[in-house]
Image (cartoon, helix red, strand yellow):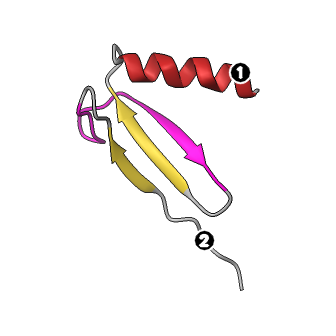
Amino acid sequence: MFDVLRPTTVTCSYCKAGPADGGVRTVCIGERSLSVTWHTADCPHLAADRILAERES
């Protein structure tokens, strides 16, 4: 009846952070998907994610 979104954990290709060592994460929600990407605080991908999020809000 209801579809439950199960998150996919993504390891950052740049900083290689995961849930154990990443301090920050970005979440991407699609129509039927949810992914969580972990980053270290100084990862440039995190900075890019924040810039893109500002444009979408």
Identify the secondary structure beneath mark 2. loop
Question: Is 10 one of the magenta-colored residues?
Answer: no
Question: Is 20 one of the magenta-colored residues?
Answer: yes
Who is closer to the viewer here, 19 or 36? 36
Vertical side of 41 occupied by 12: above or below:
below
The quadrant in which residue 19 appears is top left
Give residue 34's position: percent from left, percent from top: 55, 54
Residue at 50%, 19% in the rendered image: 48
Residue at 41%, 40% in the rendered image: 37
| Apparent side of residue 39 relative to residue 57 in the rendered image (left or right) | left
Give residue 32's position: percent from left, percent from top: 63, 64
Q: Main secondary structure of the magenta part?
A: loop
The quadrant the N terminus occupies is: bottom right
Vertical side of 34 occupied by 39: above or below:
above
Amino acid beneath label 1: Arg
In the rendered structure, find residue 4 and report the number of the disc placed on it. 2
Which range is magenta? 16-30
Amino acid beneath label 2: Val
| Apparent side of residue 9 relative to residue 50 in the rendered image (left or right) | left
The residue indicated by pointer 1 is: 55
Residue at 27%, 27% in the rendered image: 14
Within 10 Å of disc 1 (Cα), the crowding (few <14, some 14-19, many 20+) is: few
The quadrant in which residue 3 appears is bottom right
